[in-house]
Image (cartoon, coloured by chain):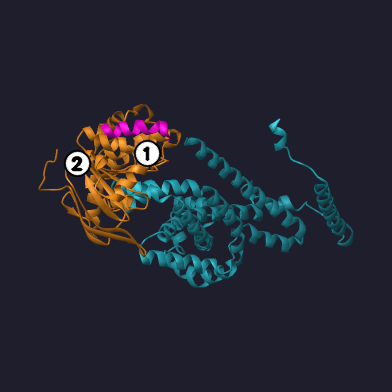
């Protein structure tokens, strides 16, 4: 399961971050290996979104080091752009570009960042739209799609950059219940293809199925990290037990 | 059933207001008629619109139509120039770098806090008189061939008045661009940060995020206020008459002075400005509706 044990694809060590006086991340260290799937959970405000947003520099960390695929995230814009083109991200609010069609949304990155021709980029886009099972919507604008469809397009858009790592920031939290499954199914497919994934989610069923590692965060710290079998059946910390009892009871 | 709630309601307040308005205008009409004893005479007007040229045996535009054409050219080029400047400085206003941000802020505040007439004089005497020779626009008419002259004349009006016309265009454009800057800035800032983050996450550079994601959406949002500003620009074009740009208001003043038909001339020109501005408003409304319906 873990290839390249000696060589993690994401290495965070001693990462701290403040929003003003409030410390969101407190000395966080996390290693993720290529092909590994990590699910991050924890109460709201625990810093889990901030943690993954630091990995592609949507947030800047103030202490510690983050190395992604051998590239250190520092002040060098080239490093940042390189990392961003290798790391895909899916947002809670989809964030599709409303002025572009579904196909154009997907082809934008390949054309402008990778320098593909429009034709190649659109072929690539169709391939991934097929993969998220939504090729028939290619010519539509995002505004006319359902939430679940929009989120699948967002996943396809990220995949078109052929990233080595995918980050998911609560991808199903803004969806109506009946649409959650179609998005999770796509994510499970992706997991089975061997993609390195870090997901912030409250979907514990999904976590049990796909995660290699569960990470539990509270108040800006990683409290516990273990494989799901152990995490769900015998959590070590009181805080984890309490959280799990709250989230699994209904 | 539900339509009845959409119907306009009429109450006694409306009747009182309407009577008041009718009474007011009746009074004005009465004053003009009996107290001023003004003899209305519109007969001179057509002669100031067009004149018969014996030499060429054709109808040529006279002062008022010439003025209208100058106003149209002035407004057209100023709108283009002001939009270009306004978009550049508007993007500078949202920059993360200090210099572009401070510079564009200074520009906007300087112009917004000086009365237009004062700005126009300052600009005309100190800046325009330097820029025009620098760009070689004052001697352009001598350097153009006959075809060049007729092209320039079509685009910018009489060649002999070129430097005058350009002063007017620059002046008006720089003045209005300050307001367009603020419109563009608010448009850019109204695009949610999620859009920018999504653009970042697929690896677009800062400029690409602006060019392909933020700006196209911002442009669509700012079209209504931009259209409003364009109409203000057309109206503001009348104040460049103060620096002797021979546009509609300037020439109207001349006609009013020489004919002594002050009432008729100004009432007529008010109508001309109204038709001009209102038709622009209608065109922009159409454009807006077209853009709205194309994206669903």
- Report in which chain the residue with disc 1 lies: A
Q: Are marks 2 and 1 on the same chain?
A: yes
Q: Determine which quarter of the picture holds residue B137.
A: bottom left
Identify which residue is drawn at 32% across, 41% down.
A108
Chain letter for the cyan part: B
**Residue range corresponding to the magenta coloring:** A176-188
Q: Which mark is residue B255?
A: none
Label 1 sits on a secondary structure element that is loop
Position of B134 with respect to B39 (left or right) is left
Question: Of residues B209 and B194, which is closer to you in this image?
Answer: B194
Foreground mark, 2 or 1? 1
Position of A3 with respect to B43 (left or right) is left
Give percent across and percent down for residue A239: 31, 50
Numbered circles on residues, count: 2
Give percent across and percent down for residue B293: 51, 36
Neighbourhood count class around disc 2 (C-alpha, 10 Å): few under 14, some 14–19, many 20 upward:
many
Give the residue at mark 2: A36
Identify which residue is drawn at 17% across, 48% down.
A69
On-image quarter of the N terminus of chain A: top left
Give the residue at mark 1: A249
Identify which residue is drawn at 41% across, 67% down.
B102
Q: Is residue A185 magenta?
A: yes
Give percent across and percent down for residue A176: 43, 35
Give percent across and percent down for residue B71: 59, 55
What colour denotes chain A? orange
């Amino acid at each position: 399961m873990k290839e390249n044990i000696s060589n993690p694809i994401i290495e965070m060590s001693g990462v701290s971050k403040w929003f003003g006086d409030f410390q969101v991340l407190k000395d966080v260290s996390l290693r993720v290996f290529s092909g590994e799937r990590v699910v991050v959970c924890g109460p709201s405000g625990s810093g889990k979104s901030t943690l993954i947003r630091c990995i592609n520099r949507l947030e800047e960390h103030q202490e510690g080091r983050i190395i992604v695929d051998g590239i250190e995230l520092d002040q060098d814009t080239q490093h940042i752009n390189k990392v961003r083109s290798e790391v895909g991200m899916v947002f809670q609010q989809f964030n599709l570009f409303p002025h572009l069609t579904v196909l154009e949304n997907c082809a934008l990155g390949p054309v402008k960042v990778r320098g593909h021709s429009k034709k190649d980029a659109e072929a690539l886009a169709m391939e991934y739209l097929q993969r998220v099972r939504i090729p028939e919507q290619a010519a539509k604008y995002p505004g006319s799609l359902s939430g679940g469809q929009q989120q699948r397009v967002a996943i396809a858009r990220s995949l078109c950059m052929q990233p080595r790592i995918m980050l998911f920031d609560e991808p199903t939290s803004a969806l109506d219940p009946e649409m959650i499954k179609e998005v999770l199914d796509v994510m499970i497919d992706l997991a089975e293809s061997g993609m390195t994934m870090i997901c912030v989610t409250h979907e514990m069923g999904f976590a049990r199925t796909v995660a290699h590692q569960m990470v539990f965060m509270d108040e800006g710290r990683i409290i516990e990290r273990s494989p799901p079998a152990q995490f769900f059946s015998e959590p070590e910390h009181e805080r984890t037990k309490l959280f799990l009892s709250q989230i699994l009871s209904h | 059933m539900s339509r009845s709630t959409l119907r306009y309601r009429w109450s006694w307040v409306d009747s009182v207001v309407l009577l008041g308005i009718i009474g007011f205008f009746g009074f004005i009409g009465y004053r003009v008629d009996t107290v001023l004893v003004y003899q209305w005479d519109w007969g001179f007007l057509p002669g100031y619109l067009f004149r018969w040229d014996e030499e060429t045996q054709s109808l040529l535009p006279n002062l008022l139509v010439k003025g209208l054409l100058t106003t149209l050219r002035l407004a057209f080029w100023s709108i283009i120039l002001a939009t270009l400047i306004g978009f550049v400085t508007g993007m500078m206003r949202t920059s993360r770098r200090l210099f572009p941000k401070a510079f564009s802020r200074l520009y906007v505040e300087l112009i917004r806090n000086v009365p237009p007439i004062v700005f126009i004089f300052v600009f005309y005497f100190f800046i325009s008189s330097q820029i025009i020779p620098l760009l070689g626009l004052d001697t352009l008419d001598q350097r153009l061939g006959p075809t060049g002259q007729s092209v320039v004349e079509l685009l910018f009006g009489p060649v002999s008045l070129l430097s005058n016309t350009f002063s007017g265009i620059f002046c008006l454009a720089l003045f209005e661009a300050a307001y367009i800057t603020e419109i563009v800035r608010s448009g850019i800032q109204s695009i949610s940060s999620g859009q920018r983050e999504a653009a970042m996450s697929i690896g677009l550079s800062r400029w690409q995020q602006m060019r392909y994601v933020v700006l196209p959406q911002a442009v669509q949002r700012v079209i209504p206020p931009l259209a409003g500003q364009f109409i203000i620009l057309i109206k503001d074009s009348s104040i460049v008459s103060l620096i002797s740009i021979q546009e509609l208001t300037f020439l109207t003043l001349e006609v009013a002075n020489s004919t002594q038909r002050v009432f008729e001339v100004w009432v007529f020109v008010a109508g001309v400005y109204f038709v001009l501005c209102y038709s622009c408003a209608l065109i922009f409304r159409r454009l807006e509706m077209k853009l709205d319906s194309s994206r669903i």
